[in-house]
Amino acid sequence: MSQVMEKKTPFTPAATHESAYEKDWSPLGRTWLDELRKSALERFLEVGFPNRRMEAWRFTDPARIARIPFRYAGDEAPTDAVAAGVRQFTFGHDAASELVFVNGHFHPQLSTLGKLPRGVKVGTLAEAFENDRARVEQHLARHALVEQNPFVALNTAFLRHGAYVHLSRGTSLDGPIHLLFLFTSSEESAAAHPRVLILAEDNVEATLVETYAGAGLHEGRAPYFTNAVTEIVCGVDCRIDHCKLQQEALSAFHVATMQVTLGRQTRFVSHAASRRGRFTRNEQNVVMAGQYADATLNGLVCIDGAQHVDNHTLLDHATPNCASHELYKHVLGGRATGVFKGKILVRPDAQKTDSKQTSKALLLSDEAQMHSQPALEIYADDVKCTHGSTIGPVDEEMVFYLRSRGISLEASRHLLTYAFAADVTRRIRVEPVRRRLEDFMAQQHGLPQDLRITDLGAHDEVARNS
């Protein structure tokens, strides 16, 4: 794509968008916010969309997004169909708090704030900018940088609605905070740019879930585009679990960036699952900024047809004595394509680093493709780092093992595929997330109820060999 074509973006703000901004944001501090969005837009227009000549985009073509004239998704009153979509994806009483965004716009009547402990703030960025302005200015767009990612610049340029979570020192939550971003049926191609800012002070224990889903969308409808950015900042001695469920409609384009900064002795565990969507690109970057920080990134991709999912991860060991663990599994059927590019970066001062990275892909058809690029970049000499990658079909020896015990050929293959994915899902501590993923896998592979792995202890051999 030429530079001229890149600058002719369909996302340039129109006057109607500017008037919408005026209504949605408080006049307090407009100068700072307007300047932030203006500089982000200028950055995007300067660099344009990335292209496949760039190494980071070699296997993923962003021109597929640039060619479609997406309009900015408008705010609409919730209909019965929207309410039904929310019921389909809500956590209900399993969530400590649940914010619902429809087509990128916050809907308080569909949300449930719940009874939160003192010191926990859950709401919109617009409210936070009025009530917690100094803290928002300190962190918003300070971690996910517009200079490093054109899609972050695009998101920041259209920064309008978003979620804000602030967890004060010593906070502990029993249930998860659920952020639900729902796209509903529309006859035109539309785009939304969700933004999430999560701030955890010292000694915080909490679970957060982001769900991106499509509801009431028939497969022949116009495509839509979700461009999400999440910034998570953790203090000292925190325990944070984060889950992301991507189950958009098959017509969806989904691009997401998550930037995480960890303080001393903080443990961060992430589970990211991609199930649907035409085109998905996820970037997860974790900086271990304090000693003895510990990061775990687990990912699961289950796609078929002509779907495409690209996962890029960065584990940045910036200080000594930190550990990281990464496991990504891909299940690819039909003509689906998967990309995994994971990088472990060990900076010069990060001695005593302990890091392990594993990528595994299961190809269910001859047409499915997987591109795996695990990488180590090490500038310290006292480290322990390993990485590995495997790609292949279902193990025929394991199929024979199961068939010898009376299980049919088709059921054997389905069971092995389910066990392969369950190696990730069983690590998820958030019950509604784990249950949904396991039910999806069982339904997708047509397993009878008595063959579902609800207690994996009896199937450890199958899981280990997958």
Image (spheres, rainbow, N blue to C red):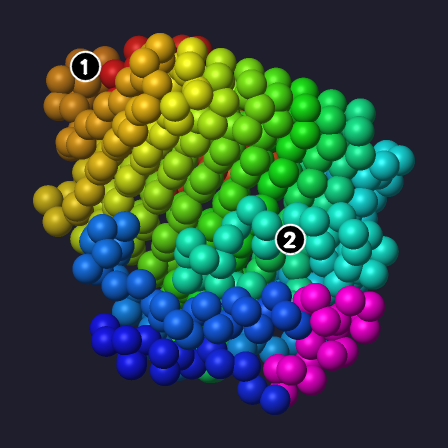
Closer to viewer: mark 2 or mark 1: 2
Return the residue at label 1. 401
What stretch of residues is rendered in magenta? 16-33
Tell me if residue 402 comes above or below residue 65 in the rendering.
Answer: above
Q: Residue furthest left?
A: 366
Q: Is there any visible trace of residue 459 in the rendered image?
A: no
Q: Position of residue 385 (x, y in %)?
A: 32, 17
Which labelled disc corresponds to residue 140?
2
Characterize the local packing of mark 1: few (<14), some (14-19) or many (20 or more) Cα atoms within 10 angstroms.
few
Q: Nearer the viewer, residue 155 or 174?
A: 155
The number of callouts visible is 2
Taking the magenta stretch, the answer to whether it contains residue 20 is: yes
Q: Give the quadrant of residue 109.
A: bottom right
**Which is nearer the N-term, disc 2 or disc 1?**
2
Q: Is there any visible trace of residue 287 in the rendered image?
A: yes
The amino acid type, in three-letter code, at marker 2 is Leu
Q: Quadrant of the C terminus?
A: top left
Characterize the local packing of mark 2: few (<14), some (14-19) or many (20 or more) Cα atoms within 10 angstroms.
many
Q: Residue furthest front?
A: 348
Tell me if residue 298 comes above or below residue 106 in the rendering.
Answer: above
Q: Give the quadrant of residue 261.
A: top right
Q: CA distance from mark 2 to mark 1?
A: 54 Å
Q: Nearer the viewer, residue 429 or 350?
A: 350
Taking the magenta stretch, the answer to whether it contains residue 285 is: no
